[in-house]
Amino acid sequence: MADAIEGTETDSFRVAVDAFIKGRLQAKLDKLGEDDPKRTELLAQHQHAAWLEDAARRVRQIQAVTHSLKPIHPDARGSNLYVPPTQMPHLDEVGSHVLGEGFAADVVGNAAALDVYKLLKLQANGQTLLLALSQDQGDALAALSDDTEQAKAWRDAFVGLTAKRDEAASSHERAKQLYWLIGDDACKDDQYHLLAPLYATSLAHAVHGELQEHRFGDANKEARQARRDGKMHDGIFHHYPDLAVQKLGGTKPQNISQLNSERGGINYLLSSLPPTWKSSDLRLPAHATSVFDRLFSGRLEVRRTLRQFSAFLATNPPENKETRDRVDAFVERLVAEATIMAGAFREALPAGWSLEAPYDDLAMVEKLWLDPLRAELPDQGDFAREWLWMDWPAAIGKRFAQWLNTRLEGRFAVGDAEHRQWKKLLLVDESEDGWAKQLHRLRQSMDALTPIPTRNTHDELVAGEVQA
């Protein structure tokens, strides 16, 4: 008889193995009656040596993997790979290599033999039985048998679970194969390399565990509730928009793999949709001398107001106060739209955008109007002085009046009085979102002292006569 394995620390794995076999036996006995003849057969099959002998035989029907083929297609036949993450090259991208030593190996093959892998996952002293056997540890061997030769024979069989299979690597017609161009001539078949992608099952399992905790864990539930209630919370709220769930294996997820069975076939897919494009009304004045010519004229509200304005003037309204009020209302709507457009430029574009080459032709006064925060940039002292001098608002008012005069030419007798009035409206619009209020706020942020007129303080002001 072979010599017995010596060692004092042999109880931990041995106790775990005996408890595992006993548990499987009890689960089957519970389904039988006290006088069922099958009980005797089951008791014999679940003796320590008998069960391990059978397990060492059946372990050949399964294989430990980190990358499997079955999830690609359940009927695919071909090679699976077991590559510990620590043996993979380190990349900046997320991949199986990020798992390090703390990864869960998967098992594929005959589902009826998956109980053998459960045996090998038993832990003692912080190690799995499979790892301890692969390191030829004495207590792990002793857990198998007191007979040295028998224990080593079973160890070789169990450790073969992670060994590379003898057969050559192969793929299958149902695998989603890819032809990858490795040469320079895409028209030649020999310039391609055939890739058979495998499912990173160990990585998928780690992702599943992370998402399960983030979705259903108590910590994230508290953070989610605090977010709903609008309350402060010290934790982190995790949210995965457009998360998809892929079910592998249908009603028999164990036919795909062991880890897939543990997840109930659930595999999470993170959203990879491209960003939703949102069209903006803001168009940039590239190679334009003025924003009034096309950009401002092309705004929806401006076109609508000009049509209504023109239609009103086409009726030849009498020259009275009601007509003047109607005209002022149309003009104020256009002034408000100009203010909105200028605000959109400041919010959507970075300070100094007007320095770029496509906007060289844009009038300086309009750059001062639309890109005011350029004055705060280094080496923009001249621009800042021009902005603070405040000649440009009158110039903008004049350009606005000329634009509107051109648009209404032939339909309304635009004289100097109207010209001045429209510039004044543009300059001293004092509504909360009006231009004058915005200038006040901008100038205050830039420590400017020159006052900007408002209607309340400068009713007598003629457009263009801004005090510097």
Image: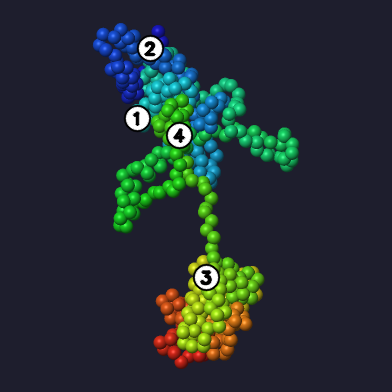
Q: CA gap, disc 4 to disc 3?
A: 50 Å
The amino acid beneath tag 3 is Glu
**For mark 3, what is the residue?**
301
Say if mark 2 contacts mark 4, CB within 8 Å.
no
Image quadrant for the N terminus?
A: top left
Q: Which mark is residue 79?
A: none
10 Å neighbourhood of mark 1: few (<14), some, or many (≥20)? few
Residue 133 occupies quadrant: top left
Residue 18 occupies quadrant: top left
Q: Which mark is residue 125?
A: 1
Q: Residue at x 49, y 84 (%)?
A: 323
Q: Which mark is residue 247?
A: 4
The amino acid beneath tag 1 is Asn
User: What element does badge 2 sit on?
Assistant: helix
Left or right side of 27 for 450: right
The amino acid beneath tag 2 is Ala
Q: Which badge, 4 or 3, comes first in the chain's sequence?
A: 4
**For mark 2, what is the residue?**
50
Q: CA gap, disc 4 to disc 1?
A: 35 Å
Left or right side of 103 for 400: right
Image location (x, y in percent) of residue 46: 34, 14
Q: CA gap, disc 3 to disc 2?
A: 86 Å
Task: Please identify, in this view, whether the residue under mark 4 or under mark 3 is nearer the observer.
Answer: 3
